[in-house]
Image (cartoon, rainbow, N blue to C red):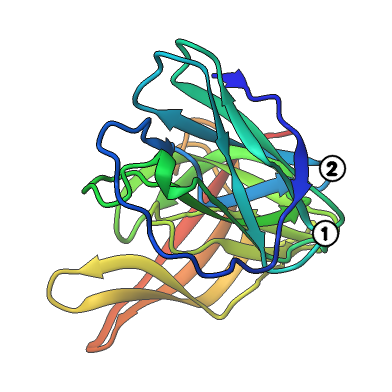
């Protein structure tokens, strides 16, 4: 994808109502890529993020207006236009990010005018992109394996992250459902303090519905060689009580096995 060079303009807070334009089936049909992430997480020193814009007909060069709307003034600056060269069916525009508070969500909406789209066509992509943007200072602390003994009954690779601002560790999306993260504090001893007393896992039992992981105990322990792996391994262990609305499945631990401290 080529970078669209365009003037930058701070986004407006509101958009006046305008009646919809008739759809031109022979129009260029400009839209936002389905691969754009609606939840944008940026490092603390990041100043921009990218958004992919596509079109169906790449025959001729095309300049497309781009409307941006923000809830808060002065946070984002987006291009006023998207510039497609002849033969180019995709470009990337960059949205500049100003001074924001860490760990605070900010929203921006980008819209392509109706006359450049197939506004009423049934499609999985569209002329509007909404992004929730947050800055955070989590950085990788250790590579490891997450061992879900209760549900997956399997190991899979995960990265343990650390935030200096919060003095907090995080295992992102431990159950691979996108529902939650496990956060905790740790002073280097056996003591581990989870950031929550329970976690909505995003796991669903076909008969009993959503499953919640309730913290019973958490600790940093060492497992001897042969118990989990061929060598001694350091483990963050979370003992959970697994419940649904109808009752409990009992207590089963989940483990983060530290393979390499970065």
Q: Which of the labelled discs sits on residue 45, or is there none?
A: 2
- Residue beneath disc 1: 74
192 up-or-down from 51: above or below: below
Q: Nearer the viewer, residue 259 or 142?
A: 142
Examine the rendering and report whether any part of residue 259 can be seen: no
Decide: few, some or many residues near mark 2? Use Cα within 10 Å; few <14, some 14-19, many ≥20.
few
Q: Nearer the viewer, mark 2 or mark 1?
A: 1
Residue 233 placement: quadrant? top right
Q: Nearer the viewer, residue 127 or 65?
A: 65
- Residue 111 in the image, given as x and y percentages of width and height: 52, 50
Secondary structure at badge 2 equals loop
Asked if residue 127 lies left or right of residue 120, the reply is right
Decide: few, some or many residues near mark 1? Use Cα within 10 Å; few <14, some 14-19, many ≥20.
some
Asked if residue 255 lies left or right of residue 22, the reply is right
- Residue 134 in the image, given as x and y percentages of width and height: 69, 57
Examine the rendering and report whether any part of residue 81 can be seen: yes
Residue 96 placement: quadrant? top right
33 up-or-down from 190: above or below: above
Secondary structure at badge 1 equals loop
Q: Nearer the viewer, residue 202 or 254?
A: 202
- Residue 255 in the image, given as x and y percentages of width and height: 49, 54
On-image quarter of the C terminus: top right
Mark positioned earlier in the residue sequence (2 or 1): 2
Q: Which of the labelled discs sits on residue 188, or is there none?
A: none
On-image quarter of the N terminus: top right
Alpha carbons under labels 2 and 1: distance apart: 17 Å
């Amino acid at each position: 994808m080529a970078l669209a060079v365009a003037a930058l303009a701070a986004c407006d807070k509101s958009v006046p109502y305008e009646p919809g334009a008739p759809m031109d089936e022979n129009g260029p049909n400009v839209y936002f890529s389905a691969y754009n992430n609606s939840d944008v997480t940026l490092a603390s020193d990041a100043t921009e993020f990218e958004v992919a814009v596509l079109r169906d007909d790449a025959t001729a060069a095309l300049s497309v207006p781009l409307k941006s709307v923000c809830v808060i003034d002065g946070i984002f600056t987006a291009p006023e236009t998207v510039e497609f060269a002849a033969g180019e069916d995709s470009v990337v525009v960059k949205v500049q990010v100003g001074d924001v508070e860490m760990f605070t969500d900010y929203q921006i909406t980008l819209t392509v005018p109706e006359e450049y789209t197939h506004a009423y066509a049934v499609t999985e992509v569209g002329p509007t992109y909404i992004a929730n943007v947050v800055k955070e200072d989590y950085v990788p602390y250790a590579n490891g394996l997450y061992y879900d003994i209760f549900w997956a009954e399997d190991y899979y690779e995960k990265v343990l992250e650390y935030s200096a601002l919060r003095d907090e560790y995080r295992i992102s999306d431990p159950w691979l459902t996108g529902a939650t993260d496990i956060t905790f504090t740790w002073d280097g001893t056996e003591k581990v303090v989870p950031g929550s007393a329970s976690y909505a896992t995003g796991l669903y039992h076909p008969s009993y519905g959503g499953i919640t992981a309730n913290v019973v105990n958490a600790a940093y322990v060492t497992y001897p060689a042969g118990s989990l792996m061929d060598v001694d391994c350091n483990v963050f262990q979370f003992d959970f009580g697994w419940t649904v609305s109808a009752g409990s499945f009992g207590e089963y631990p989940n483990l983060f096995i530290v393979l390499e401290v970065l």
